[in-house]
Amino acid sequence: MYEYFSMALRAPKDITECGRFFAEPSQPRQRMYEALRAYFFEGRPTQEVARAFGYSPGSFRVLCHQFRRDADPQFFIAPLHGPREQPKKSKARDLAVQLRKQNHSVYEISEELKQRNMPLSPTAVRELLRAEGFAPLPRRLDEQRPARLGPVAEPVADVREFSLTPGTQFVTRCGGLFLFVPDLVRLKFDALAKSAHLPGSVMIPPEHALRAMLALKLWSVERKSHVMALVSDPGLALFCGLNVIPKKSYLCEYSSRLDHVRTTSLLAAWHRTVAQDHLFGGESFNLDFHSVPYYGEDPQVEKHFVSMRSRSQPSVLAFLAQDAEGRAFCYSNADLRKGEEAEEIFAFIDFWKKHHGDYPRHLVFDSRLTTYPNLTRLDDLGITFITLRRRSPALLTEIEGLPPSAWRRVRLDVPARKYKTPRVFEQPVALAGATLRQLFVLDLGHEEPTILLTNDRHSSPAKLLTRYAQRMLIENALSDAVRFFHMDALSSTVGLKVDFDMATLVIASGLYRMLAKRMRGYADAQARHISARVKRVVASVKLLKAGYRRSSGVR
């Protein structure tokens, strides 16, 4: 209470030091007291006192005037800060006390105050009643509580509780999902989960669990926790073949049960399933890495460069391959550690050869995807590739030293492209034991020159430039996957869960490509553009008889 007394007790016991405590006050209230004492009691001049205690003469005269008018000056009691009362509590005090005398709970009192434009939280009501001397009410039974809206416990997902009762009808906002049902039935999608040996249970078999995970990806549900907003939708449950869709806890736990071997088996089963539809042309592939940023703390998550942030930060590195003709993702792997990036291209090559019987014919990728020695390995395997070479200072100096006569103009047969006539200089180059074609390209729309490396010894420079420009398809697909499939909005913390999410992304992108081919004018559209039309379908579903259902869009 008396802070200066306590400060004096803590002061050094030396007399000189104790005297300094009074001669050199450090606290504002103590300095004010010593200055007024020196003027009124010791009779020292105003100018001298003001200078000694750090006041200007004018402000010290105002201080003396206020002291003369203050009948009870407080120097040794700390002033109270903030308002002396709480306006909201004071306004609601009488009504809150009246309601408590009628045995209303703090929640009921809070709701009543809100209806009377005196909003007060239950915690604030509890503090107010405690200050008035009221003890908490004893806990009441559910039947003793007043009737009001509250949380509803949804049934547990169990395939044994699923039934198709004739005559049942309902309206679902997930009606667009039924547009994918014809493809799922034709492809015998349930057999895919079994052939991949995915885990399951008696309540939720593997094929139903996979459909539940896929439904969220097709419906662009950002996070697994957001499924709780759709858990009561009967259409979503019907799509999964369950009485209700599994809750978020099950979905998170299910992905943790899958290792990379199971995920790769799922991708292999998907390739076998769509083999008859020729979803993947297999002529050429676009390859790229994508870093899924992670904002938590986990020692297993390493730092990778995140292009969207232009910095290195904790993230999960994912490798993706896209079929250039069909524009669908055909391979993914997020079970990568630092230092394994350069070899991942051969993991994709081995995967394709194992399940299609031959090596990929043509690969297009960025300069940082693999190393120069690995380019020699690709050339030895007979795989044609196009990639970029990093612009080193020596190469830039070489380009600047080329005479104008060494360059030749080529015309790109791309009507929508702005820069159609770049300048090209071609030469052979020896890298890591292989002789490759190197193309210096200017006037391509970039300030810096573009340096192309390829082992394609027959295609013209114009054809090579046109094909590499089409690599932007995977950049656009990755951008679409980030925005629509929410590739960066994963709640998982380890690469294993992201690995499974990438596999569902591959399947979902394939299903959207199949749907796009059936939609007039949408053959080349991205998934988000197709979904913008699909999500408008609010379906009225009526079960005519067991085993048969009809869904019709109402708008």
Image (cartoon, helix red, strand yellow):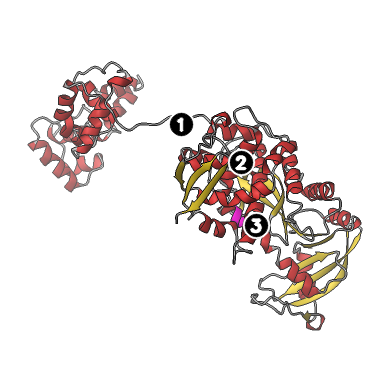
Residue type pointed to by label 2: Arg
Give the residue pinned by disc 3.
Answer: 513
Q: Is residue 505 magenta?
A: no
Give the residue pinned by disc 2.
Answer: 211
Left or right: 6, with 428 as reference point: left
Left or right: 265, with 102 as reference point: right
Mark 2 to mark 1 CA distance (whole Å): 20 Å
Quadrant showing the C terminus: bottom left
* Mark 2 residue element: helix
The image shows residue 481 at horizontal and vertical percentages of: 60, 53
Residue at x 32% of width, y 21% of height? 142
Residue at x 32% of width, y 33% of height? 149
Residue most extreme to the bottom: 405
Check the image and report above or below for 407 versus 227. Answer: below
Residue type pointed to by label 1: Glu
Residue at x 26% of width, y 35% of height? 28
Segment colored magenta: 477-481
